[in-house]
Each structure stands twice: as C-alpha cells, then as structure tokens.
Amino acid sequence: MAVLLAGALLLPVVACSGPIGGDDGPVGAGESIPAGTEPGPGEGPDARTGSGPDAAPDTPPLPASLTDQLPRWSACGPPDVLQGGGPAPSPPPDGTAWECARLTVPVDWTDPTGETIGLALIRIGALPDDSTPRVGSLVFNFGGPGGSAVASLPGFEHRFTGLRAGFDLVGMDPRGVGASAGVVCLDDTAVDRNLREVGFPRDAAGEEEWLRAREEYAAGCAERAGGLLPHLTTANTARDLDLLRHVLGDSGLHYYGASYGSKLGAVYAGLFPERVGRMVLDSVVDPGRSVVERSLGQTEGFQRALEVFLADCAGRADCPTGTHPGEGARVVGDLLEGLADRPLPTADGRPLTQRLALHGVIGSLYSDTGRTRLRAALGRALAGDGTGLLEAADRYLGRDGEGRYRNLHAANTAVNCADFASRPGPAEVRRYRAEFLAASPVLGPYLVWDLTACHGWPVVSERDQPEVHAPGARPILLVGTTGDPATPYEGAERMREALGDGTGILLTLEGEGHGAYTGGDPCVVTAVDAHLLSGATPPDGTVCERTRWPPDPGPGGEESTYRRERP
C-alpha cells in the first residue's frame, strides 16, 4: 500500500552510494534521447513551449545535450531495492501501460557542462474525454525527502484516475533517491546492528556512543557518495523539475507535492514564479522554522496524533491501553522506557529495541490502517511479543522481508543536511529537552535526539531556509489537515503567508492523518480536481469538515462537506 512520507523527519536511524555521471543502472526504464535524435511516434512533446530551460536563476545556460533531450519511454521493470522493491507496475483497469525513462541532469547546476546523473521517471498516459481539455503532464512528489515517486505513483493511481482526463501522470525519483543515484550510507547488516545496539542516550557513555554512530554514518555517506552530497539540495531538485517541465513540453509546471513534496513545490515557485502551472501542495511543510522549531513542531504533532489514537482506543472493547487516554499514555510511555533494558522477543528473531518500537509507534500514526494495526501491536507487546511493533518499524524504515532497506532514510538525511546550515549537537539537546518533554511526555525524550541527525555531516549549507516567496505566480492550492501528525497544520498557514498575497490559497480539512487528497476525502478531492483540471481554485479559507472520525474499521469512506469559514 502506498503511503505518504513524513515531511523531513530526522530520526537518526542510520540506515551513501550512487555513481556520479553516466548511467545509474536500469529502472526497467529507457534512456533519454540525445539531442539531435528524432523521437519515435508519441515520444516527447509536439513543440517546445514556455521559458527556455537555460533561464534558471543564478545558473549558467544549459548545453543543448540537456535542453534538447527527449525521454525514451519504454516498459517499466520492477522497482529496485533502493526504491522499495516489489513487482513491476500493473496496468490499471483501463489497460494503459506504465512507461519508464530517464532524464539527464547536471550534478552541479553551476557547472552544467560537467558531470551528469540520470533521474528515473515513470508515467501513465491521459484518458481524454470530450468534456475535459488536455492540460499537460502532472508531476508528483509524495514526500520524504527520500520517497521514490517512480515506485509510489502506481499505488496511488486509483486516487488519480479522474485527473487523467486532462493529464499524463508523471513521477520522478529526485536526485539521490531510489534509482536516481540513490544515496546509501551503510549496508543493510550495519543498519540492523545500529538499530539493535545503539540506544537513545541516558548517560555520558550513551551520548558518546550515539554521536560516534552518527559520525560513522556520516563517514559512510562521504565515502560512498561524497561528490554528490553537496548537490542534493531542494533547490537543485527544483531546477531538475524545471528541466523536466521543459522536456515534457509544458509552459508551466503542473504539480502535486505532499509532505516534503510541498516544500519542493514551494521552492520551485520561489525560483520560477512565472512557470508555476496548476499546483497543489498537500500536508504542507512549514517554510520558516529552524531545525529545532521544525523538530519540536513534529513532536507536538505526533503527540496530538497519539492522544487522538488513545482516545479512540479507550472506547473500544479490545483496547490494550486502558479505558482512559491518560492511562493509555502512561502505558505506552512505560512500554517504551522498559525496552531500553529489556527488548522484546519477536517471531523474526530480531529483538524489539526501544528505537525500533518508537519507529513502529510513530509510523503507525500516519493513517487509519496504521492506527488499527497499532492497537493490535501494542496488545501483543504488552503481552511480551514485540512482533507487531517490529513489523510496523520495518514498514516505516523501508526494510523488506529479506532484510534489505530502501534508501528513504539515507536520502532523507542527505537532503536535509544539504538544505540546513544549522548543526545542533548535545548542548542543544540539553537546552531544549524540557521543551520536547512538554511537547510530548511520551515521545519527547527520544525525539529530542533528532536534533543531532546532521552531526559529523561532511557538507554544510549556507542557509537554513530556501526562498519560497513567489510574487506573480498563479494561485497555488495549499491543503492542510488540522490533525496532521507529521506536518502540523500551522505550517500550511505559514506557507500561505510566505508565498505571498494571492498566491497561497488555503483549503483546510478538519480531521486526522497525513495526506488529505490521497486519503480520498470527497470534499478535498472535489476541490483539488477542479483546481487541477479546470483551474477553478476554491476560495481562500475554504474548510472541509469530516462528519465522522475515526472511521469504522470496515469498508466505506468518510463523509465531509464544504464550509466557508476560515479567513
């Protein structure tokens, strides 16, 4: 099942290799067609439109070998391990085949005639009808940073079928992600060992062990992908998106970005406001927070989500955490604390450690399905069996049944450490510990160590925040969920301010979960589809109110209605 990914959660999970230049290996995809080669039928756009691709701000003109390339679309093979593995994408019920290709981009956008890498692409063609004119290509990013859109898009297609009336649907693995020179810092055995042996610090010796593990992780990234690490910024990925827009033949970038994908879309708008097409940013990342503020905000969001889960659980006959939410918080807190000294056995044979249990709990708070599983997993853990929480942790960390990890968390660290100049360390952990405990008495004692995720990193950014102000851009629809655990709702409000008057248009879903549009809420779907297909943007401040949450565990959807309230 496809899920949205956290907006830059920096849990130090140590999971960094990817060749620079040339072919990065098969994705079951074709290459790009070199400049001067005539495309076959249906390959590439009918005409080049819009601003030239050599007009990227603060970068030199691109050579014709990049600007004149056309993707060579061919049948997709199975996603590779770094993308998450699994079978090749199956055609949807209409029978349209998925196609894959590669886009060649410069490693260093300030030296576009230098080394290049290939970015993995996937697409499915439009289903035009007489009532909807073709708009172009709609590009997707589902978050992370580190999520593979090439692997994820087929799992979401059933949510987007209506959009195919006006769009080809296109996914791209960003630089450093999946099959696009995917960064790997440690091998799978080393990741397992770290999660088993390195616990959250409780004393000076534990702190030294923790920081040493971070340094080893950073050194592994530098050894395997050092030449690429300085170039894995969100701004460079936004420039890649603009080259993709050009080779697809669109005058504006039509885009759906969720979670971290919202940050990527906003950065694109800041760089290329005149090239913004029909754009939707869902589960919106706060554009102005520091590293500490961002991590603290996520901690607050996960605490709110945990409280909602415990309140719902308390009313169910099979709730393992008691009949009162306060009691449930104590039970979960005691469980996590006890695992520091007494890991639980599992059917897998790997012990459920404190860190793995924390990942299992947090990863389960993203969706209704995860919360249902969490109820059962906690029941098993309280009975002495850690299998359920270990399975939840594996899903969150991208570990498959053969013990192989996708590169989600390695790429997450690499992109965030390239984007942010701040390098909080143990002193900041001690300074802000009380605030994290206040934000979440259950999760805060552990999430405060997120602050050290870039400790020892070999690359330092020049600033903490990219520019997202986009004067003159066409309206960008922002979708925020009031109970979003990973990207708290306040971030959507701040993004509206940062984009500028008349650019950010806020649509609010009053409910829980991460990803309003992909969650299928009918009110949100109606508004987003209208914005993308016809350019009919809802009024700023529109609210979609869920009439029932949490939903019953059986089949059926959640009802919601429009309201126009929020200024």
Image (tube, rainbow, N blue to C red):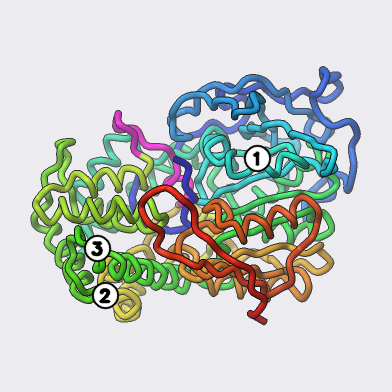
| SS at badge 1 | helix
| Quadrant (top left, top right, bottom left, bottom right) of the C terminus | bottom right
| Quadrant (top left, top right, bottom left, bottom right) of the N terminus | top left
Q: Mark 2 points at which residue?
A: 441
Q: Residue at x 25, y 46 (%)?
A: 194
On the rendered structure, is 114 left or right of 174? right
Residue 181 in sight from this viewpoint: no
Q: Measuring from the top left, give residue 510's x and y in whole percent.
A: 52, 70
**Is most of the magenta stretch helix, strand or loop?**
loop
The amino acid on which the numbered mark 2 sits, given as a three-letter code, is Pro
Q: Residues within 10 Å of mark 3 (few under 14, many from 20)?
A: few
Q: Which mark is residue 161?
A: 1
Question: How many numbered marks does the figure carry?
Answer: 3
Q: Which mark is residue 316?
A: 3
Identify whether 441 is placed above or below 243: below
The residues colored magenta run: 399-412
Query: Residue 494 appears in which quarter of the rendering?
Result: bottom right
